[in-house]
């Protein structure tokens, strides 16, 4: 098992066990003490168990080397996993939304008794805060959409559990209806998170790029190769945490095929040296001044200084 796979597997299992303990505690306490908000928080945490298990499976698949049917590797398994996570989160959010609205309109308001609902909410805030920081760092370290998506879900959970804590306090001082309102707010936040994760992962699955900085790194690298000019038709494809680059360059039309190949190799090596996430570069060589109708790709002017779109 390589280092990336080992890190992701350990982080995913930590998420599974931490969320399992929290979910069980919140669901039981929410049910026993008749708190819709605590119960809703528990159900939301229950979906986090699934998302953590999904990252376990996807990290194992993504660590497989390229093969005949997957020449670009298996890294997009993590992006697909993040997409699946978004659907599960959306379903949980809609279910909670419906049950919360039902409770509000039917006037099923009760006084939450006991100290445990407050305690479990406070513990949830602390654990979720730690999980967010931990998983976000892991996601950035191994460049995993699945872990970053899971971390963002943890971040929302911090606010959710904090809101539940406040709702229980207000319920205890006489605002019985606040419990249902808090559950409603939680459901809306869950749905919002699902849409954010879905949108983010769509860029990669459609070979889109939200940040053009990688293109500036490519053009900077080509400047170091004196015999290569007019880099254009540059296209970058993100596959998981890796980048695959296609690029056209122009060289002196009088040099030999061997010399042209050597220039292309220098361009490839220079680009890979600029960014260790670039796995491969395909360089197409043209004579200087070549004019032809070409498929879409970026040149240096179009990157606009690497600004985000």
Image: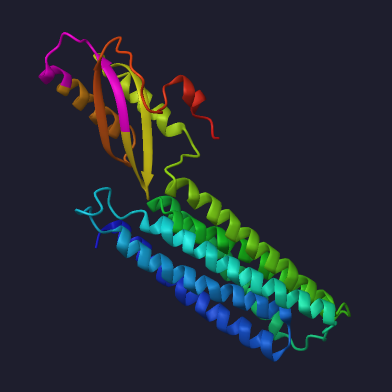
In the rendered image, residue 51 lying in the magenta stretch gets the answer no
Colour scheme of this structure image?
Answer: rainbow
Relative to 177, does residue 86 appear above or below in the rendering?
Answer: above
Outermost front residue: 293
Which residues are drawn in magenta? 246-260
Relative to 251, does residue 25 appear above or below in the rendering?
Answer: below
Query: In x, y percent, where is residue 27?
Result: 62, 83
Q: Residue at x 45, y 54 (%)?
A: 145
Whether residue 19 is visible here, answered yes or no, is yes
Image quadrant in which you'd find residue 129: bottom right
Image quadrant in which you'd find residue 234: top left
Q: Nearer the viewer, residue 150 or 21?
A: 150
Question: In which quadrant is the N terminus drawn?
Answer: bottom left
Q: Would residue 135 appear left or right of 258 to someone viewing this image? A: right
Q: Would residue 10 appear left or right of 173 to someone viewing this image? A: left
Q: Nearer the viewer, residue 288 or 15?
A: 288
Query: In x, y percent, where is residue 152?
Result: 56, 58
Q: Residue at x 48, y 59 (%)?
A: 83
Q: Would residue 230 appear left or right of 282 to someone viewing this image? A: right
Q: Residue at x 33, y 54 (%)?
A: 75
């Amino acid at each position: 098992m390589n280092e990336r796979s080992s890190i992701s597997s350990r982080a995913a299992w930590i998420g599974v066990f931490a969320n399992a303990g929290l979910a069980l505690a919140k669901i039981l306490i929410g049910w026993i003490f008749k708190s819709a908000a605590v119960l809703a928080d528990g159900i939301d945490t229950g979906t986090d168990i699934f998302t953590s298990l999904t990252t376990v499976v996807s990290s194992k698949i993504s660590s497989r080397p390229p093969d005949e049917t997957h020449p670009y590797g298996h890294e997009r398994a993590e992006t697909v996993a993040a997409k699946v996570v978004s659907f599960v989160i959306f379903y949980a959010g809609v279910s909670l939304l419906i049950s919360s609205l039902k409770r509000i309109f039917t006037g099923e308001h009760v006084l939450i008794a006991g100290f445990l609902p407050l305690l479990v909410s406070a513990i949830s805030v602390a654990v979720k805060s730690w999980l967010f920081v931990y998983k976000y760092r892991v996601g950035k370290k191994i460049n995993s959409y699945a872990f970053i998506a899971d971390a963002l879900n943890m971040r929302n959970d911090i606010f959710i559990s904090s809101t539940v804590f406040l709702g229980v306090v207000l319920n205890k001082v006489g605002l019985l209806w606040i419990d249902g309102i808090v559950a409603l707010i939680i459901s809306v936040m869950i749905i919002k998170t699902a849409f954010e994760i879905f949108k983010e992962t769509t860029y990669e699955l459609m070979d889109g790029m939200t940040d053009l900085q990688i293109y500036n790194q490519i053009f900077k690298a080509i400047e170091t190769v004196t015999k290569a000019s007019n880099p254009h038709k540059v296209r970058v494809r993100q596959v998981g945490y890796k980048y695959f680059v296609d690029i056209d360059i122009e060289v002196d039309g009088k040099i030999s095929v061997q010399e042209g190949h050597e220039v292309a190799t220098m361009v490839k090596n220079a680009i890979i040296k600029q960014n260790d996430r670039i796995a491969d570069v395909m360089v197409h060589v043209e004579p200087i001044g070549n004019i032809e109708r070409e498929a879409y790709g970026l040149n240096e002017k179009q990157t606009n200084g690497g600004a985000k779109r």
